[in-house]
Amino acid sequence: MITQNKKTTNLRNSGPVSLENGSLKANIESYCKLLSLSSVATNYESAALDAAKAKLSYQDYLYKLLQQQIIDRVDRSVNARIKKAGFKYLATLEEFDFSFQPQIDEKLIRELATLSFLDSATNILLLGAPGVGKTHLSIAIGLEATKQRRRVKFINAEDLTNELIAANRSNTLTDYLESMSRVELLIIDEIGYLELSKETSSLFFRLISKRYEKASTIITSNKEFQEWGSIFNDDVIATA
């Protein structure tokens, strides 16, 4: 008969036990890295000191650590969306001087900044002479959308037409249009500074048609809508 000696160890009141080699600090930071908790790894020591001073419970300490992790993660997500959107520059409504442009309906712009128009896939035209703030306002609305974790793309009209032509000539237009249709808010800046060829006008129309009633588009232009026939070389496409 084979017997096995059993050794019993009393862990009560023996203090904390480390199951891995290395310091407790190193183990904590290793676990945080494994779980992608970079904010916890950065803040847990200073947060512990603050918790001790404030006499917080363990639960409150843990809650504050995790809350900061969520905040930092959301911030990183938003920053990534802002970078991917390709804004010409960053602008907010708070920076816009509505008193300098009294012809602009401030109430309407602030309503647009609530992003309710995205839910109905409504398109927006911002028209006016150069310098009135069309690009600023479009970016401000787009920035609000990124903060709400919406997919946004900002592109100059000339760059857009170049991308459309390149996609068409490389036989990747279908994929390009499909990709653009998934953008929740497309901002096309400065329609009107160039005259489009028949080919480019047709490609532009296909893009707008692909997105119609599926996603919102903001277009800024220095020309009134009735002048768009001269931009597209086709009154039918301009009014479609």
Image (cartoon, grey):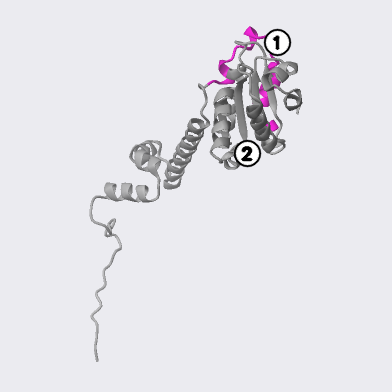
Quarter where residue 69 is shown: top left
Residue 177 higher or lower than 232, as above or below: below
Task: Please say whether residue 149 is visible from this viewpoint.
Answer: no
Residue 160 higher or lower than 167, as above or below: above
From the top left corner, tell me how far across and down residue 102 is, in percent: 68, 9
| 22 or 129, nearer to the observer | 129
Q: Quadrant of the C terminus?
A: top right
From the top left corner, tell me how far across and down residue 105 is, in percent: 71, 16
Which residue is tagged 2? 181
| 106 or 133, nearer to the observer | 133
**What kind of element bears circle 1?**
loop
Q: Magenta residues, as a range?
A: 91-118
Mark 1–mark 2 distance (CA, rounded to whole Å):
33 Å
Q: Amino acid at mark 2?
A: Ser
From the top left corner, tell me how far across and down residue 187 is, in percent: 60, 27
Which residue is tagged 1? 103
Q: Amino acid at mark 1?
A: Gln
Number of other residues with Cα within 10 Å of mark 1, as a class: few under 14, some 14 to 19, many 20 or more: few
First in sequence: mark 1 vs mark 2? 1
From the top left corner, tell me how far across and down residue 166 is, in percent: 54, 33
Residue 195 higher or lower than 84, as above or below: above
